[in-house]
Amino acid sequence: MSRWLLGFTLLWACLAACYQQIPSPDLWWLLADGRLISQTGSIPSTDPFSWTAQGLPWHNDQWLAGWIAFQVYRLTGLEGLHLAKALLITLTLGLLLDTGRQLRSDGQYGWLAPALAITLAAADGANFFDVRAYLFTYLGLALLWRWLQLRERLHPAAVFVLFCLWANLHAGVSSGLLLLGLECLVQRRVHLVKMTLLALLASCCNPSGVWLLLHPLRLLGSPWGLYLNEWAPLWRRPDKFAPLLFNLACWLVWGLAARPRWQKGDLVLLLFACFSLTGWRHIPLFALLALPRWCLHLKGPAQAWQACCAALLLWGGLKPFWLADPAQSREQEYFPQRACSALAELPELPRKLFHPYGLGGYLLWRDFQVCIDGRAVQVYPWETYKSYLLAALPTQSEGDNPEPARLRFDQYCRDHDVQAALLFTRQKEAGLWLVQGNKRWRPVYSDDLVTLVVTEEVRSFRQSR
């Protein structure tokens, strides 16, 4: 009975922690990738979606995740994708909890709920458990960590299949190689050395080859890592790392108090934590891998801990019910759903758009040619993103003076022959203020989210027809 109750609590908590009212902006380009693969039967290796990088190499490291996501979306819609996400994370946490249970010599279940609550709080699931290919990295790390923690002898076929699939689902396979390499370094076993080399070979079995493994190195210290929030390191976004730092500090203190002599698994996890602090998107990685160690280290009055954590999980579990709006109903609130539907009825308008960065994925999903989107370093040269930023926002030295940015925006559109722009109606980045006072641009559609503006030439052509 206790196992069934624990399983139900786990699913309940995951559905709550993973609940989001809106889909990730990057979901849309992932779906577009999956749709293109389904239609053509081949994996795109050059960019077909943008006008700034048209034909340039696309290091498509998430093609399999995109194909899977599109098949789920085609059958069940956004609600099905969110349910699949919750079940995938439930499987991930279930594997880690069972690993922690097996590590405990007493075999008790009493500490699993507290460990789960600590992990969900530190992992900040509301921000990081969205529908993205990253979910497969969580699952891959859980499987690998389970093998390593339970001292199971890694079977070569299982290692090769895991890393080969992982390398075609998400570039986070590099974190799995890092974990395996750290374990190899600490344990110093010949078998682990062989498995690490085999995993490295399997990871190269993807459309981008060895470039996939170099991808994280390109981000560290690059301009992309400075300007894209999800790759911002600890020292640039300390507020986002607060739950992870608290978890790490508590784990270090508690682990030393519970076991004055550290085990090798603790040392591997500590070394892995240093990697987790290099990027905002890495926040859940340490939190998830620490779950089995929390199960092992927690001791004391279990009943009090369980009561507190049960209240936390119950409150979180009720969230999907008092936040009643499903993801589908809020799509138009955060993405230009109505604007794209209106544009579909005006085929004479240009399909080549200037737009905010965060809307790029949705626009290419709706068959518009975009200037930038969330694929970022996979497709676009840094100069492309830099020129977009200069056209969409004032620089720091300009402060609140909008005139230089307005001039840069107009010149950007002239240089690239852009005659239509979808701008935020109220927000600052790529906002409507860019064309205020410029008689060359005229609005043809507007709602609370975005306003479509076109040049006078396009407007005159429409009126003449």
Image (tube, rainbow, N blue to C red):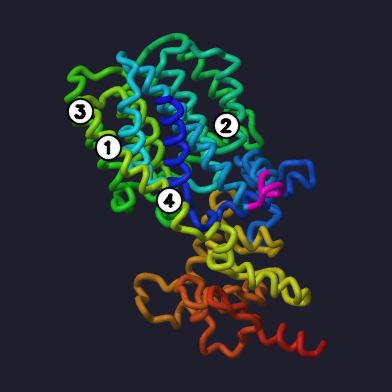
Residue 126's place in the image compared with 214, above or below, is: below
The mark nearer the N terminus, 2 or 3, is 2
Spatial CA distance of label 1 from label 3 is 11 Å
Q: Which of marks 4 and 3 is nearer the N terminus?
A: 4
Mark whose residue sits in front, 2 or 1: 1
Q: Which amino acid does label 2 sit on?
A: Trp
Q: Name the residue under label 1.
A: 307
Residue 177 visible, this orientation? no
Residue 158 falls left or right of residue 9: right
Residue pointed to by mark 2 = 166
Q: In terms of sequence position, does the residue under pointer 4 or pointer 2 come before the other?
A: 4
Mark found first going from the N terminus, 1 or 4: 4
Query: Which residues fall within the magenta stretch?
Result: 72-77
Marker count (numbered): 4
Which residue is tagged 3? 301
Q: Which amino acid does label 3 sit on?
A: Pro
| Mark 1 crowdedness (10 Å alpha carbons): few <14, some 14-19, many ≥20 | few
**Mark-to-mark CA distance, 4 and 3:** 32 Å
Question: Which residue occupies 47% across, 52% down?
Answer: 320
Check if mark 4's residue and mark 2's residue have beta carbons within 8 Å: no
Query: What element does badge 1 sit on?
Result: helix
Q: How far, Cα to Cα, is label 2 from label 1? A: 38 Å
Report how far apart the C-alphas of labels 4 and 2 lie in the structure: 22 Å
**Residue 274 visible to an observer of this rendering:** yes
Q: Report the amino acid beneath label 1.
A: Ala
Q: Answer few, some or many: residues within 10 Å of disc 2's Cα (few below 14, many 20 plus, some between 14 and 19).
A: many
First reached walking from the N terminus: tag 2 or tag 1: 2
Q: At which x and y percent is residue 266?
A: 30, 23
Q: Mark 4 points at which residue?
A: 127
Q: Work out whether 151 lies above or below 374.
A: above
